[in-house]
Amino acid sequence: MKKVTAGFGLCILLLITSTTSAQDSTQTELNMKALSGNPGSTHLLLSGVTWFGLQANLSDTVKTNVKNTFNDFGFSPMFLWKLSDKVFFESEIEIKNDGSAENGAAFDLEFAKLSYTANDYLTIGAGKMLSPFGAYNEKWEPNHIERFPNAPLRPDDNILPDDSHLFWGAIMGIDARGKIPMGSSKLTYVIYISNGPTLSKDANDRPTGVIQYENWNDNNNNKEIGGRIGLLPFSNNCLEVGFSYKHGIANSLTDTLFNQNREVSNYNIGATALAYDLNFVKSVPDLKSIIGIRGQYSSLKVDQANYYLNDSATYTFDNNLTSYFAQFSFRPAMVENCFFKNLEFLIRFNSVTPPKDALWGGKATTRLDIGLDYWLSWRTGLRLAYEMTSNPDGSKTNMIIARLATGL
Amino acid sequence: MKRIIVIIALIFAAITATTIFNGCAVPASIASKSGAQLWAENCLRCHNSPPPNDYSDGEWAAIGAHMKLRTNTMTDTEINKVVEFLQSAN
């Protein structure tokens, strides 16, 4: 009886195995047919950027101070997910040394944006996205694209808290973008609405009168509106000029201080920023080189407001700030020598002028950067720069910075 | 608030004007540009031009969608030409 049962069980097992196997074969054949006839409409790429660098301070004469350090490393995995011809999702996570994290690295979601292309002239996006204000933040900031080992001088460098993000960083909101051909030229546009900035009134938080962007929860019911218009006048797109604008109400609904000495109740303090940018890149066969000129001028104006001078007194000032940089690059990419063709020479001038009457303001800070790149491959570059900073107090700071960066 | 309205009005005026201008047909010499030519002209504006065989067909499709939005300078037709050129190397 046991033999009959065992034989019957074996037959059942063989039957199940052969059936499953047949199903697998059928499914495999179906999958193969699908693959051969249709390459698929969903595409995913896991890519990213990584970098490592060091800096040496040549100006500090105090023997006990650290003059050189490996202080710059990071890794930014980027997800590009094309769900269909109309729907696209992109996201980037940044893990980097920002000098504050106990374990030497800070974690941040740079952007996570879902976009829907309605037609050739309009794409609508939503989520956390890079601010389209100016050209630097969205187009030139990634470390494998930035030719220098660091970014241009920004208001957040030594003048304002690092998380102010006046002219760079991300926004949380919705945007619409597209481009419109005009004969041999093109007009591009981005319009967005996002959480607005906040204005500091209390020095215990941050310097009074400082605007802070990158607010993931808004402090009032007004939203920031902004955008950029770009013009590419030539058919080969070698030149692009852009104008950007953004405006938002910065004070909180409950801030009574900002309403003092005002005839109008619920006085709104607006923050308005403008930017002009230019990018010109051209191959010059006569010089066997590629030359590049780029720059951006940005300005911020905050409406007149009262700020705490101390616990009992207030003061006010013209809260205007400007920042700009201009850069020239030269790469003899078409010479035959395989060493020189991978070199790129750069020079950049930077300036930031804070509000002169603010407690944290004063004269301008300027910086001249002289750079040299060696391209190890199309995506990997070794960047060197000598940076000379003129501080508002008249002192000068000279630094050498190096970075190895690769990406995409 | 008035300033916002003026700016928004200017933006829409510019878009309307360019839509009208768009009635001017794109010259044939520009419309007939190949994917290779567009690849050489446009990638270089921000970064070195990547070799076509560095990514698979599907990856090029994802990169094309990313670049279309990030640079916001190339039309759908131009991006598709570049992606097809890059995919043709595989």
Image: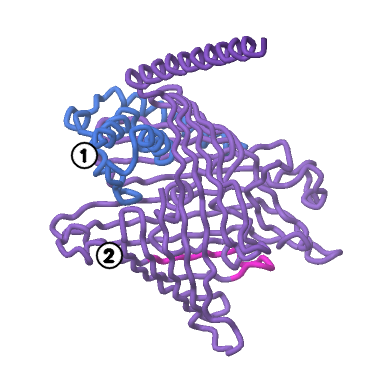
Chain colours: A purple, B blue
* Residue at 30% over, 66% down: A345
The one nearer the camera, A162 or B90, is B90
Disc 2 crowd, CA 10 A, few/some/many (<14, 14-19, 20+): some
x then y, percent, for residue A176: 50, 31
Q: In whole angstroms, how far apart are the C-alphas of marks 2 and 1?
A: 24 Å
Residue A255: give x, y in percent of width and height: 80, 48
Q: Is residue A310 left or right of residue A218?
A: right
Residue A372 placement (x, y as % from top left) = 34, 68
Dot label at residue A385: none
Callout 2, which amino acid?
Leu
Q: Residue furthest right?
A: A312
Q: Which chain does tag 1 point to? A: B
- The reply to whether label 2 and label 1 mark residues of one chain is no
Q: Nearer the viewer, residue A35 or A354?
A: A35
For the residue carrying disc 1, how many other residues have a C-alpha within 10 Å: few (<14), some (14-19), or many (20+)? few
Subunit ID for the residue under disc 2 = A
Q: Please provide the residue range marked out in magenta.
A: A348-362
Q: Which residue is mark 2?
A: A343
**Type of residue at label 1?**
Gln
Q: What's the residue at 62%, 53% (across, down)? A: A107
Which residue is found at the position 24% from the left and 33% from the top?
B88
Give above or below for A372 relative to B1.
Answer: below
Whether tag 2 and tag 1 are in contact, CB under 8 A, the answer is no
Q: Circle 1 sits in a helix, a strand or a loop, which is it?
A: helix
Mark 1 highlights which residue?
A: B37
